[in-house]
Amino acid sequence: MGWNELDARDKKGSRGRCLALTDPARGRTNVAGDLTRLLEERGVIAPDATWAPAGPDDHAEVQIGRHPRFLDADQRRELNRWWLAVKPDSTTQPVWDLVSTASIDGQDGLLLVEAKAHATELDEARKRTGNLDNEAQIRAALGQAASGLATLHPGAWRLAVDSHYQLANRFAWSWKLASMGVPVVLVYLGFLDAQEMAPCPVLRQHGDWEHAVHAYADPFVPADVWGKRLLVPGGAPFIPLIRTATITLPHPAP
């Protein structure tokens, strides 16, 4: 499948730019270099790393507990059972815009990316209603993550299903992976100059995105946590970052 065969929604905005960023036509060295820059000198992504999506021919979004190339079977099982009570190995779990293996502090780790092309794309919604046992399990997992994060970085950690659920599960999964010994860099990535997304407020400079992320996240995670290296006792580091990038689409946006 090439760019022409993609759905219109996959050819623009943050989705289109994630596919353009990881397009193998650019060469693996160039892709790895751009992904490394997102880490802000906190790690390195080698040309032989594994990332997904990987351009238009491998464009599926990633559920980490379902994907065989980022964690081993035991790690996936532990993660899935921490998050879900019913059918943990098949029920839908949080979906990531971009994931890559990386070397972080000299250890094998993961880059996790939540990408947006405009500020109003930041998701304030609550969790969709589903299986009640799973919802109770997720509430417990979020509470465990909030408590664990509070011991690493003092402040108000409000990770819940009732509001800003996407933000909550991004921080919770990052913390859980680090607690399992997997170093994580979580990047909230704003793509600049996504003109095709107008009349939504297009991000023009890094400050626009940084302001938007703080306005969105500060009531739920400590404002000064971004850029901090949080070392989980007995585990690995977790580093949340706010980053921007300018990616040119390889085609006119629909």
Image (cartoon, rainbow, N blue to C red):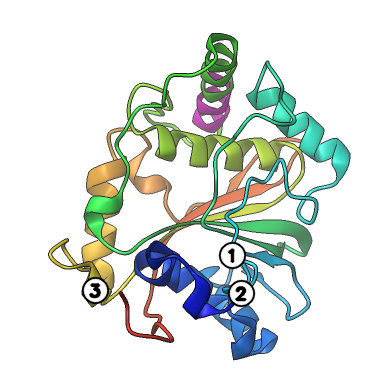
Disc on the earlier residue, 1 or 3: 1
Mark 2 lies on residue: 1
Q: Which segment is the magenta one?
A: 143-151
Q: Are marks 2 and 1 in contact (CB under 8 Å)?
A: yes
Residue 196 numbered tag:
3
Q: Position of residue 88 (x, y in %)?
A: 71, 25
Mark 1 lies on residue: 59
- 166 is higher (above) or lower (below) than 46: above
Is residue 235 toward the left or the right of residue 228 in the image?
Answer: right
Q: Which of marks 2 and 3 is in front?
A: 2
Q: Do the residues labelled 2 and 3 touch (CB within 8 Å)?
A: no
- 194 is higher (above) or lower (below) than 184: below
Residue drawn at point x = 24 percent, y = 73 percent: 196
Q: Where is residue 216 in the image (x, y as percent from the top left)?
A: 26, 44
Which quadrant of the figure contains the N terminus?
bottom right
Is residue 240 toward the left or the right of residue 82 in the image?
Answer: left
Q: Is mark 1 on a helix, strand or loop?
A: loop
